Amino acid sequence: MAGMRVTKPRIALVETLMKLDGPVSIERIHQQVGIKSCDLVTIYRCLAAFENLGLVRRSYLHNGTCLYEQTLGVDRHYHIVCKSCGKTDKVDYTLPDGVEQRLQDKGYSHLSHVVEFFGVCQECQQVAISARGTSIGIPARGTSVGIVTEA
Amino acid sequence: MAGMRVTKPRIALVETLMKLDGPVSIERIHQQVGIKSCDLVTIYRCLAAFENLGLVRRSYLHNGTCLYEQTLGVDRHYHIVCKSCGKTDKVDYTLPDGVEQRLQDKGYSHLSHVVEFFGVCQECQQVAISARGTSIGIPARGTSVGIVTEA
DNA sequence: CAATAACATGCAAGACCTCGAATTTTCCGA
DNA sequence: TCGGAAAATTCGAGGTCTTGCATGTTATTG
């Protein structure tokens, strides 16, 4: 083991993460795990722990809210996220080779990075056209009633 | 003008942004502008407006909090941010050419992206060594009493 | 198997960021 | 110079995410 204990919430969380694939919101995970079975804070903490172990990767919506994704047997990839509906898609991108090496040479340790692309997907553009006048519905962190319906 | 009005808060804000260089926190800007001269929310909204006009660029600390930076006569660049003290530095990196084009071809519009590097700077590593046992002090969004002392 | 140390969880509180509605300020033409 | 429309600002409230502390569980030692 990796210095972590096997607890009921943790088991349920892992099972859920395996079932879902692609980045999902914490709220979604919480619902899937079962609101009763554990507190939202526990999900946050467990995911943070899993992230340290590299079992899980974090990405972001345009508004800064997080999505998590299980990473076992999946190669490293990046996402484009729709600013409007939150849908995510893989992007053909890889970090240039020398960058992190140069930073290390400069004396930085514990390196990590965030690369995230944002845009408005085709479907949302069409919706925006048919509903002229309404601005594109970019959600915001201080807003939205809980769940951003992914997928 | 650019469809925007010249108001007292806006003037003070621009002056402050010119004085400061490099990414700074909103709290810092607010203090510099003068807590009395305008509300924190106004700073948020003005910076958002300035960002739309391209006068200002936004970057992020490891914990997700924002830093703003004036961009007049400055070329586009990216940052490495210390996870511990929040200090920022320029990084020798540019986004590969084809990426956004490919996304556009896929039907995405209103493209933007975030690229951010994180690490622990040399000074903070030494502090961590001299203070064994204490973990590296990565601040967090729900924490910190207002100001992360930049620079 | 019992006792203990270490880790995990839940709750409450706080930080950051955003929006909506009401008020104030700016800008324009007469 | 004055009056009114449009835009900015303020205030209050709500949403996401993180922490501290008290409590509950898990694993380990004797």
Image (spheres, coloured by chain):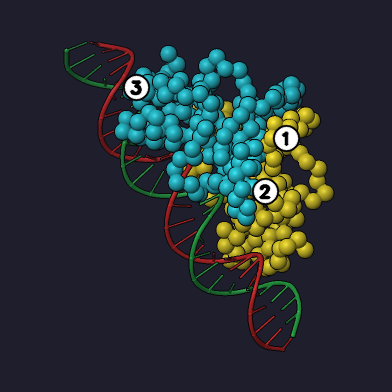
Chain colours: A cyan, B yellow, C green, D red
Find residue A151 and report its horizontal and vertical position in percent: 52, 32
Mark 3 element type: loop
Decide: few, some or many residues near mark 1? Use Cα within 10 Å; few <14, some 14-19, many ≥20: some
Q: Which residue is mark 1?
A: B104
Q: Chain of mark 3?
A: A
Q: Chain of mark 1?
A: B
Residue type for callout 3: Thr
Which of the two residues, A130 or B34, is positioned nearer the viewer here?
A130
Q: How far apart are labels 2 and 1 at the CA level?
A: 27 Å
Q: How far apart are labels 1 and 3 at the CA level?
A: 45 Å
Label pair 2/1, CB-CB below 8 angstroms = no
Give the mark nearer the N terminus: 2 vs 1.
2
Label pair 2/3, CB-CB below 8 angstroms = no
Disc nearest the viewer among 1 and 3: 1
Residue type for callout 1: Gln
**In the figure, B35 relative to B106: above or below?**
below
**In the figure, A139 relative to B38: above or below?**
above
Number of numbered callouts drawn: 3
Please tell me if label 2 and label 1 are on a single chain: yes
Mark 2 element type: strand
Whether residue B9 is visible, yes or no, is yes
Q: Which residue is mark 2?
A: B68
Q: Which residue is mark 3?
A: A7
